[in-house]
Amino acid sequence: MTSTLDVTVSSTDPAPTAARHLVCRGCGAQYPLAAQHACYECFGPLEVGYDQAALARVTREQIEAGPQNLWRYSPLLPVGQDPASRVSLNPGCTPLVRGDALAAELGMTGQLWVKDDSANPTHSFKDRVVSVALTAAKGLGFTRFACASTGNLANSVAAHAAHAGVPSVVFIPSDLEQGKVLTTAVYGGDVVAIEGSYDDVNRLCSELTETDEFEDTAFVNVNVRPYYAEGSKTLGYEIAEQLGWRLPAQVVIPMASGELLTKVDKAFSELVAIGLVPDTPWKIFGAQSAGCNPIAVALHADTDVITPVRPTGIAKSLNIGDPAAGLYALEAVRRTGGWMDYADDDEIRAAIRQLARTTGVFAETAGGVTTAVLGKLVAAGRLDPSAETVVLNTGEGLKTLDAVAGLVGPTHRVKPSLRAAREAGLLG
Amino acid sequence: MTSTLDVTVSSTDPAPTAARHLVCRGCGAQYPLAAQHACYECFGPLEVGYDQAALARVTREQIEAGPQNLWRYSPLLPVGQDPASRVSLNPGCTPLVRGDALAAELGMTGQLWVKDDSANPTHSFKDRVVSVALTAAKGLGFTRFACASTGNLANSVAAHAAHAGVPSVVFIPSDLEQGKVLTTAVYGGDVVAIEGSYDDVNRLCSELTETDEFEDTAFVNVNVRPYYAEGSKTLGYEIAEQLGWRLPAQVVIPMASGELLTKVDKAFSELVAIGLVPDTPWKIFGAQSAGCNPIAVALHADTDVITPVRPTGIAKSLNIGDPAAGLYALEAVRRTGGWMDYADDDEIRAAIRQLARTTGVFAETAGGVTTAVLGKLVAAGRLDPSAETVVLNTGEGLKTLDAVAGLVGPTHRVKPSLRAAREAGLLG
């Protein structure tokens, strides 16, 4: 695939993209807006670079006049300015839920919010990155959609492809939760179970992108990854807009590759630079599971050396043992004065129940990780309990029911009669 | 519970309710806005009656200036005008998804839409009725929330109660899908599994409302049912607003009690009466499963005698064998010139996959029922394939995974190497 995105700015185009090039996060080398994800000079990862003057012209009013989904932020994205160009189930504008009872249990006196991205069409934040990636992929001329996935991404790619009428092939570890496998396979695309870890899946997909047979295939998180990653910024934009165009003091974010964390930080930086929010400080906190904690371990050891691990544990959506954006996550957390921690499986299960019981939000294991780590950060004095805090739930409890299957169930079982109800203690 | 809702209209109240009384759907007798669901004169069901002059003052602009959830329609609801009064996870404004590929497969040439209510906070349309019921319940002074449920309603009541910090007790048949039981129990309220059918559960709940021990308990679909049922109107309002303030020619609706169907019809009638949409004809179609089809069978037999059945089959959320609003559903379908049909379990499973494959929407069994019946209505010439049609998906596929568990899964299983991928045929 040798085409590039059309960023020609004509005087009649009402909303041209502000994206101008791909830029290496390592050495700063610039490339055209093509299907490229690594720097030819230093092999560093590429991200989308913008015309800062064009970004600076974006206004709150322009965004607020947009649709009630992530495309309201299209002036800040590389693609999707033209509604007809979008390949999307229109995710975004998910609820920012008050967490007053959770805050009280954790001893927090500042306002606590849960940003609930399980409300997206396929019930995870991945719909954001997929919408942006596939819109770019279509613009670049790709005719098949693919991904390497720990589950949620496969759900989203398969659903988006079905909606768009485009063939898809998704690659997943063969030991995924049944819920995530079925929710992917039901859309009728190809689902390839790989007998290995996510990191094995990811390596295979990188190899496949180099084959002739996959030349027309966009792997959302491989060969169009720079566009894909930009989709995560919308989570940061939404939090700020939903707070009334201001930044929270603290935000707790789950980490798999670490990319989501870096992009929420990038979103906050952009909003300040553009002048859409006041320039107030924020701290970024990262959450991993004890079964896959290479980034948090590096932070705790005060090193930049992230040692890959072979992931274990129930938080499968976070099980990336060799995290591509780990270094950048460390940088963001150190720069903002945040911290990272990790939670084990029992803590994750307890936190899923705690979040549900106190807020009405039923999270998948990743949300349990984030909630458990929030509690640990407060207990350890790393997170200020008196400052406003947003905790991210990135996925849906219905996809990882096994996490609570042995722990919750009917509290009573009775025959259908008033007498039986009385004998069961239901009448006091 | 002897209190009534405060409907005092003061000159300083910016948005008073237009609700004025409860009115018997049988004999027309009127009662105050209290916790009463049956007529003292004829035992007929009560519904909310409005000041028609007040309704007529509601404008499109007023609604469009409201929040992006069902409370934008609060001028047309009995409660919730004051945001502080709401007990709600703020459902509504769910996607109206184009169904072009599904229409093509079914031989339809008119525009087809899927109204996807799985996008609600607990992933079914029940969040709508629960939000309105619990807001009324709080206004009436109840201090515990309850319901009789086939699953989705229990999810929603438990989640809303957790969010509001109010105790809950939900009653379900003991043979429900595991997904729905866990998604209810995780919120930490009481979950009572009844060894019987939904109709047994419902009867027990009716008896419990009469006991002293449950005097302070609002059963959303028993003693505050008139308010509860009004929440379903918002589905009809949204369809009309999302189509640009006009009515679709045809709408296909799943039936359990039959109440949802009657309330969508009521919503359309109200919008015409108020003048918010042009007065164009609409036809209402009802869908049941073959395992629980008493309303459709009565229509087919051209009778008003609805013979209760003992439900069977996988569409458990629709398994109400003695449907409370069946007669009114028959009336609405006959009056508008629609029809009803039913689908068996194999047809439901196939339709779930067809809907997912063609639209990207993964429905629970009830959505499979509606999609399968849509196909049957087209094939039988009962539904005009050239007229605009909306089909309702009322719930989420993740809650009824067993329906597709044996039918879909990975299409390939390979070791993580290019060679293995080639041998598996993935490279052509």
Image: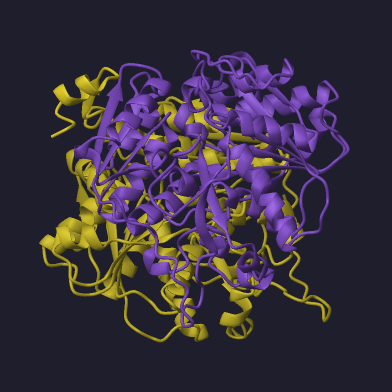
Chain colours: A yellow, B purple
Is residue A193 placed above or below A155 in the rendered structure?
Answer: above
Which one is nearer the viewer's eye here, B234 or B212? B212
Which one is nearer the viewer's eye here, A134 or B54? B54
Q: Quadrant of the C terminus of chain B?
A: top right
Give me the residue at 58% from left, 40% from top. Answer: B27
Observer able to see residue B44: yes
Which one is nearer the viewer's eye here, B397 or A348? B397
Residue B75: image location, x then y, percent? 56, 65
| Marker count (numbered) | 0
Is residue B326 placed above or below A11 in the rendered structure?
Answer: above
Going by the image, does A340 lie left or right of A94? Answer: left
Residue B49 sits in quarter:
bottom right
Give me the residue at 37% from left, 18% from top. Answer: B175
- Residue furthest toward the front? B41
Which one is nearer the viewer's eye here, B104 or A222? B104
Going by the image, does B424 lie left or right of B278? Answer: left
Residue A278: image location, x then y, percent? 41, 86
Residue B53: image location, x then y, percent? 65, 67
Give me the residue at 42% from left, 37% from top. Answer: B153
Residue B40: image location, x then y, percent? 44, 39
Observer able to see residue A317: no
Going by the image, does A329 lie left or right of A270? Answer: left
Is residue B131 placed above or below A268 in the rendered structure?
Answer: above
Is residue B70 placed above or below B303 in the rendered structure?
Answer: below
